[in-house]
Image (spheres, rainbow, N blue to C red):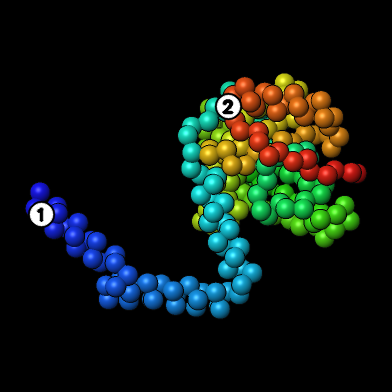
Amino acid sequence: MKTLGGTSQVCSELTSLQHPIYLFCTIKVYFLVISIWHVLGYAVFMKIILLIFLVMGCSVGKPIRTIESVNLDKFLTKWYVIAGRLTYFEKGAHNAVEDYSWAENKEHIKINFYFNKDDYSGEVKSIPQKAWVYNTTSNAHWKVRPFWPLKLDYIILDIAEDYSWTAVGVPNQNYLWIMAKDWKMSDEKLQGIIKRLNNIDYSTKDIIRVPQKW
């Protein structure tokens, strides 16, 4: 008990702001962050910070029930993003589209996510990604890579029997995407999908509509 007490006291002293070692490490980290900021520029630096939080949001959480089985031949196609709880990078998205297709030799899935920024005629933003089917039994759990070396969880929560719509989420439920093969969806239809997600205990708070007009 004495040893543990002594260790605790030493740790307490080392983490004290008055301790020279702690001060040295804090100053060193501070200047390292400032150096990275200057090298990359403010915009790139902030995007990296936001991506770190996005990774934390996508990859941590309790196990979530996926759909039992996904037919990839039917799923790998063009989807219109109808509504959801979106990431920072999708802010102001209009006419958002998620397009899936096999890469050569089916080594991975190619994802092309694109939208008009802030308006239907706004600048086209494109975010190409790669995905791998993580659960090959159900095909409903993927790992998506926006850029190396990151791989984020992609969970297919629900899908229409005729594959006309689908709902995708992440383990900690921070994000949600409701997509359809037709860009027009009634509020009644959307509410029915939201009800289904509520029934599997996936959060549906703060869902917003993505403006679609083609």
Residue situated in front as seen by the camera: 82 or 206: 206
> Could you tell me residue 115's position as x and y percent?
78, 51
Instruction: List x then y, in percent, for residue 50.
Output: 58, 58
Say if 102 sits above or below 163 in the image. Answer: below
Residue 106 shows in this picture = no
x, y percent for residue 5: 14, 54
| Residue 48 point in image, percent of width and height | 57, 62
- Image side of residue 88 versus residue 15, left or right: right
Q: CA distance from mark 2 to mark 1?
A: 47 Å
Q: Check disc 2 and give the amino acid type.
A: Asp
Q: Which residue appears farthest toward the left when viewing the image? A: 2
Residue at (68% x, 39% y) in the render? 206
Q: Which residue is mark 2?
A: 201
Q: Quadrant of residue 214?
A: top right
Q: Amino acid at mark 1?
A: Thr
Judging depth in this view, the residue of 182 and 8 nearest the camera is 8
Which element carries disc 1, helix, strand or loop?
A: helix
Q: Residue at x 60, y 53 (%)?
A: 146
